Structure formats: structure tokens, C-alpha cells
Amino acid sequence: MGIFYEEVKERMIRYARINTQSARFTGTWPTTERQFDLARLLGAELREIGASDVYLDPVHCVVYGKIPATVEVSSTSPVGFIAHMDTAPDASGENVRPWVLENYDGSDIVLNPEKGIVMRAADYPVLSNYIGQDLILTDGTTLLGGDDKASIAAIMTMASYYCAHPEIPHGLICLAFTPDEEVGGLAHTLDLTRFGSPVAYTLDGDHLGWYEDETFNASGALLRIRGRSVHTGTAKGIMINAADIASAFMQMLPPHEKPQFTEKKEGFYHVVSCNATCEEAEVYLIVRDFDRDAFERREAYLAECVDALNAQYGPGTATIEITEQYRNMKEVLRNHPALVANLKRAISDVGLVPVCEPFRGGTDGAALSFRGLPCPNLSAGYENAHGRFEFVPIQSMEKNVEILLRLCSIFAGTAV
């Protein structure tokens, strides 16, 4: 066990027990008040370890803190780290019961003997990468919340270590913990002035040692359909069934341009939800593509579909609202090559092989990059996120602490 083993383990378990699920379509930010429960705890812990400028935004639920420089500021570059506090609404986050399986042997894992819930190694081949390691798991009835609490545990452990060892040289380190990443919050309430660093890294994602400097372009689209209901006995020539029209729209989407049929840099349409009656229907979908031109063609195609529906069923039957979510961070980060170079060096320096693939998703860093805070992403090291079979290898969190420390030394100019 390394020097950070117990601390990252205890932090991850402590944070996981707090329900911080965000929610879609609430119209409020944060989308759930329960995210403040973790925010208040993190604020208190930052003060306890000796961080400076600790602040919890009482409206927007963003936690800020700084680790002051221990070397001449003029000779260093500030660096920031950002992680999100919310967990996904895709599986329950209520009453999470984390537990530790030590020295995993590669076999099936019984998560819940009473309910017969088993994580089968054959279904999750990634488990074979962690034989001999110690895994934090759930009881199979909830998600774990390693996305993104594994990152918070690593960042807080790094911060605690620096505060306890002021003799270690480093520059200004700026921290922020944000809400609602899982539902498109995109750190839009992060105050860049208060944050205090001109560059940063988010920590979010699967697989230890992976990093991202390229994401999808992304939009969300809400299709609304207005039907006409009438008694079925006298419906001929009168009824306009909104549920049928919603189905027709979904059939217009290219059948193989969906997440389950695409990989690497292939884009897609994904229907997230459909709520329909005869009288009215709503279809919510997301649009993704790495290439900006191809992405804009996808958005244009949705408008063409709506025009076709209105031509068939009558003007005003269908309307669509397309909302930008984030853009490909590569457009910004290609102008800041040192950020990625430093990250690759830090990963290599702790004995890992850096792996970069275009991220088939987005991070808060994508939106922050376009707001003027260049922000590559370092993986948090969790696995099977957003589901009941999520797990976090403790050794991965330990290694991420080492990566963060090394990255800070590189920015301070003290790495050798």
C-alpha cells in the first residue's frame, strides 16, 4: 500500500455515501438541493486541511479553494483542478453502500447475496485489468458515484498532502468542485475570476492513465408535437395522433447512426426519452459528432424532419428546439500544446503509459475551454460508471494523486 491508500479509500467511501444525484429538466441550477450536502462537507474539509480562499457559492453550489504557492510566484505557473460533485440520474444514488473487495482474484463478484446480484467477469472484461487490486463496489442496488467522487478523493488527498508539507515546492494550485455535470451543467456557474488559474484540468472518465483533449460537438434537441384527440368511434379524418407522429420522427433518424452502432469518431443521434399521448408528445434527443461541419449537417437534418412532418400533418404540428451543450475542446486546446504535453509527461513520470482517444462524450472542460479556461481532461480511473456495477480501484485513485503531484511540480518548474 502506498502512502495515499487509506486516505483516498476513506474519502471515496465517505463521499459515496452522500446522495448527490442531479436531475434533468428541473429548470434550476443546481438541479437538486442535495448536492449542497457534499459541497458543505468539502468546504469544511478544505478549511480543516488549511486551504485558503475557501468559498461555497450559496446560490450556485460551487466550492472553491486554493493551495498557496510555496515558491517564488514569478517563477511558476498556476494550475487548477476541477471535478464535479453530482452523480448521474441513470441509476439510484440513494443509500449507497460502498464496500471494499481486497486482492480481487478475477472471478465473478457477489455484490448482494440476499438479492442474488452478481457482477460476472464475463460480462465486464475490464475487471481482468484489476486482478490483485482492491476494488470499491456497491451492493448492486445503486451506482457508486466514482464518477466523479473518485476524482474528488484524489484532488482532496493531493491538497491535504501539500498543506501538510509546506516544504514541498509548488506554485499556486486552484481547486473547484461543481454541480450538475451529468445533466449538462457544464460548470457554467463557475466564476473564473474567483477560481484564479488561467489553465486547469478536469478529472473525469474511465481507465487509469487515459486523458482527453478532444470531445464531441454536442447539442440537445426537444421535439414537441401537437396532436388532436377525438373519440375513436368518430376519429376518421379528424384525429391527429401525436404518439404516431413521434414514432414517425424516430423512424426518420438514420437507423445505424445511433450509439449502439457507432465507435471512435463516428457521430450519432440518440433518443433519450419519448413521452407521448394522442394529444401531445415530446421527444428529447442528443446529437453528437466530432467534425463541426458534419455536426451542423446533423442539426440541419433535424429541422428538415420537422418540415416534413409539418408538410404531412399540417403547419405547427411539430416544433423543435435545439440547444448547444458543448463543442469539441480540440478547437481551443490545439492552441495550448503545453497543457497536454505536461499532462502526458506527468502520467509517464509515475510509470504509466498515457493513452489518448477522442472522448465519445463531453466534460465540463469542453465548455470551460470555450469560456477562456483551457482545460484538458485526466481520467478519474473509475469503471462501469452510471450503473449498479460501477467500481473504483483504490490503486487507481492512489496513482491519480501521484499524477496530480507530478503535474504541479512540472508547473512549478521543479520536476526533474
Image (cartoon, rainbow, N blue to C red):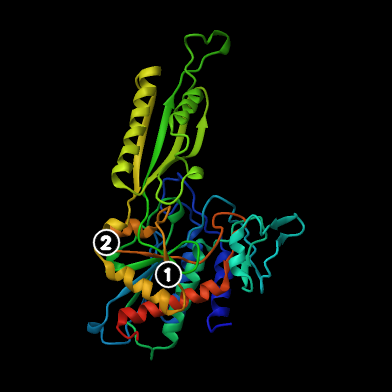
Q: Which residue is mark 2?
A: 334
Q: Measuring 42% from the left and 82% from the top, which residue is drawn there?
A: 50
Q: Say whether marks 1 and 2 touch (CB < 8 Å).
A: no
Q: Front-most of 58 and 143?
A: 143
- Compared with 5, 206 (above or below) is above
- Compared with 297, 369 (above or below) is below
Q: Quadrant of residue 30?
A: bottom left
Q: Residues within 10 Å of mark 2 (few under 14, many from 20)?
A: some
Q: Quadrant of the N terminus?
A: bottom right
Q: Front-most of 348 and 109?
A: 348
Q: Measuring 40% from the left and 80% from the top, which residue is drawn there?
A: 406
Marks 1/2: CA–CA distance:
18 Å
Q: Secondary structure at mark 1?
A: loop
Q: Measuring 63% from the left and 70% from the top, which residue is drawn there?
A: 131
Q: Which residue is mark 1?
A: 354
Q: Front-most of 406 and 294?
A: 294
Q: Which mark is residue 209?
A: none
Task: Specify whether 131 is left or right of 112.
Answer: left
Q: Is residue 196 visible?
A: no
